[in-house]
Image (cartoon, helix red, strand yellow):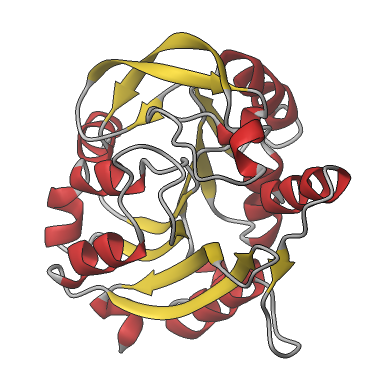
């Protein structure tokens, strides 16, 4: 959803972002629903984490796809969080939290960018194309941070069926904060944004995410929603990783 907005903004700037799907296929949420139906049944999906909930639309979609699931929606930016919290009133199974998910508990500094969907705990990096305008930082905002391990312990959550992450380069730090969950295979399916160019300074790329998850026996299932610039340079995509539970 956010990526389609970015695509439209790029087009308005005269800059083409190409989605590289070679054939008709299910969208990312269709794949997630199909996988959950296969491995445990839609009505047995009880816990979904939407990390980087933005305006709450994705959390609402998850709630509609999985009618028995409680959706924990994490969004640190105050303006976006208010939108997500308002939308969450439509569905009692959505719990919004104004938190940034990272590798430590405490506080962090969120870089608020010209296009809010690109806000990040990381400093924007200039890569020499029009995305630099979208990621231009206009101010910073102090936010509370949590780890997934600590949050689950505090909420007595023993298993996350689906972990979705779209946190603009912060995905690896969020995974480091979920090490205990990953070690015990307590996250079933991970759906995450991955980058192939460093949009943010010091940002881990796809290979870093894949290697980190591999050590916990999580397997790459599919890469989708691939976006490239007008030269064909792959910029970012979404990836689904599966635990051993979901691989059987």
Disc tally is 0
Height in image: 186 above or below 94? Answer: below
Height in image: 76 above or below 130? Answer: above
Q: Residue at x 26, y 41 (%)?
A: 173
- Residue sitting nearer the eye, 5 or 57: 5
Height in image: 231 above or below 173? Answer: below
- Residue sitting nearer the eye, 208 or 71: 208
The spot of residue 219 in percent (x, y) is 29, 78
Residue 127 can be seen, yes or no? yes
| Residue lying furthest right | 12
The spot of residue 80 in percent (x, y) is 64, 23
The spot of residue 109 in percent (x, y) is 37, 15
Quarter that holds the C terminus: bottom left
Q: Residue at x 33, y 45 (%)?
A: 203
Q: Is residue 65 left or right of residue 193?
A: right
Q: Residue at x 76, y 88 (%)?
A: 24
Quadrant of residue 163 within the rendered picture? bottom left
Height in image: 64 above or below 103? Answer: below
Q: Residue at x 13, y 61 (%)?
A: 184
Q: Is residue 147 left or right of residue 134?
A: left
Q: Is residue 17 left or right of residue 216?
A: right
Residue 41 can be seen, yes or no? no
Quadrant of residue 174 within the rendered picture? top left
- Residue sitting nearer the eye, 232 or 79: 232
């Amino acid at each position: 959803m956010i990526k389609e907005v970015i695509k439209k903004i790029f087009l308005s700037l005269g800059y083409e972002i190409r989605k590289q799907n070679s054939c008709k296929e299910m969208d990312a949420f269709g794949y997630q629903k199909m996988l959950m139906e296969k491995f445990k049944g839609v009505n047995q999906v009880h816990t979904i984490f939407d990390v980087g909930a933005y305006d709450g639309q994705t959390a609402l979609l998850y709630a509609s796809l999985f009618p028995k699931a409680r959706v924990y929606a994490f969004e640190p930016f105050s303006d976006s969080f208010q939108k997500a919290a308002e939308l969450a009133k439509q569905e009692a199974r959505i719990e919004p939290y104004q938190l940034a998910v990272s590798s430590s508990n405490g506080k962090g500094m969120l870089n608020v960018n010209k296009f809010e969907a690109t806000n990040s705990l990381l400093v924007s990096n200039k890569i020499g194309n029009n995305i630099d305008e979208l990621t231009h930082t206009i101010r910073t905002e102090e936010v509370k941070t949590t780890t997934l391990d600590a949050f689950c312990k505090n909420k007595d959550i023993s298993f996350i069926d689906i972990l979705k992450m779209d946190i603009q380069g912060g995905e690896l730090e969020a995974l480091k904060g979920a090490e205990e969950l990953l070690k015990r295979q307590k996250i079933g399916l991970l759906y995450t944004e991955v980058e192939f160019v460093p949009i943010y300074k010091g940002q881990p790329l796809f290979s870093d995410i894949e290697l980190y998850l591999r050590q916990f026996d999580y397997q790459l299932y599919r890469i989708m929603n691939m976006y490239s610039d007008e030269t064909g340079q792959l910029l970012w995509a979404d990836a689904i990783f599966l635990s051993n539970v979901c691989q059987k």
